Image (spheres, rainbow, N blue to C red):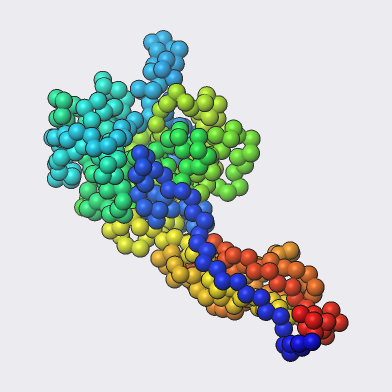
Amino acid sequence: MLIKSRACLTFSLLVAAAPLLAAPPAVGGCQVFPTNHFWNTPIDQLPVDSVNSANWVNSVGPTRSLHADWGNKLNDGSVPPINEILSYGIPFSAGPSPMLATITFDVANESDPNPYRIPSNAAVEGGASSDGDRHVLSVDTTACKLYELFSATQTSNNTWNASSGAIFDLNSNALRTAGFTSADASGLAIFPGLVRWEEVEAGEIAHAIRFTAANIWGSLDIILHKYIWPARHWSGSQNNPNYPPMGARFRLKASFNISAFDSRTQVILRAFKKYGMVLVDGGSNWFFQGVSSTSWPDIVLSQLNGGMIKGGDFEVVDTSLLQINVNSAQAVQVPSAPANVIATSANTQVTLSFTAPADNGGSPIVTSVLYPAYKATCNPGAKTATGNTSPLIVTGLTNGTPYTCTVAAANVTGVGAASSNVNVTPRSPFSIAAILLLLFD
């Protein structure tokens, strides 16, 4: 009989886990910006902007209802009839290398130069005779580039006139030159913030959603303008800090109950909670934009536009914590999982040693006001321990009870994915069961 002399039982498991991230949005095989782009970064764990949240929500209207600014009908039945598919929503085209088009710009000094790849039959927002914003969006799915125009009118088969335009590399986090507009007043891209039916049908919108407001903080004085990262441009000359600036990000409160809504509507509401809405243009208060389609169920649009969701159900989050470089849309992510977790059992406790995550998300793993640097959790009973480094000791456990333990790391933006499970059973070193196990193991 081999007798093993040891004072404790050790169980180890090597882990190489990564954060459980949603699949990024895509179109035609092109990912719509990197996973760590501002548009694609969850903000559900960010703190509320305690300085501005109440004022900015109140300025847009806490009792005003949200409005989904797109349609699903070819004829709404009114007199005269309105074609919702053409009149509402922001259309886009997507396909391999559309034809080269030449654009004449009114704001040429802030627009990206020619050529643009826009098909000759590209849809214009509001329809061919529209007197509205007349956005034109085109995705070249060969080069994965996005072309966007504002106030666009086609003058010949491959020639357009537009107020402004911008080209975005969908594989890049690059921002436009500071102070430059785009096809949007914020200087950001339009397409990544649109609600599309195919995303809802798939069950998840993995990006923020664009919205408009009537009163926007756009000026600090007669020379300086106001917008916040990653916006690059302002709207109007209002110098009232009680109004939100371009780039402000709003989040549906976690306490808002979505259970009574249709499952398709819930997809959008979950996106409001996880990714939020970004103020990108002047317009009607709480109007958020999407792509019109006859596929949209009536009940979804009815629930979104039926007064069931108010501005006061939202709060503003502090997105300054996401910023890595003011000239890049790359955003801080939560850390990946701690690795090399080893659980050592003792009397009514477990010691968990580990190594730091391979990826800190772009921000140091530190204890903040909201989150400890590291947190160990053992179940059943959700017993926890926190600290700034390895190891962590989870106490108050029951000897002889099997526990499953994990360790997670956090930075200023939130808690990352937990490590893989480590199974361990604490034991008294003086119990008969423990002695027998030592003798015969």
List x then y, in percent, for residue 45.
52, 57
Residue lying at 27% horizontally and 39% vertically, measured from the top left: 140
- Residue 418 lies, with reference to residue 346, above or below; the image says above
Of 435 and 417, nearer the camera is 435
Q: Residue at x 38, y 29 (%)?
A: 89
Left or right: residue 36 compared with residue 426: left
Question: Residue 91, how many percent across, how many down?
Answer: 34, 30
Quarter-wise, where is residue 76 in the image? top left
Quarter the N terminus occupies: bottom right
Residue in front for this viewpoint, 205 or 441: 441
11 with respect to 440 (left or right) = left
Where residue 107 appears, x then y in whole percent? 16, 40
Which residue is located at x 24 percent, y 54 percent? 178
Query: Which x, y percent locates residue 415?
Result: 53, 62
Q: Can residue 83 be seen at all in this image of the molecule?
A: yes
When asked about the image quadrant of residue 213, the answer is top left
Residue closest to the far right: 432
Q: Quadrant of residue 130?
A: top left
- Give whichever of 153, 392 is nearer the camera: 392
What's the residue at 36%, 23% (across, down)?
87
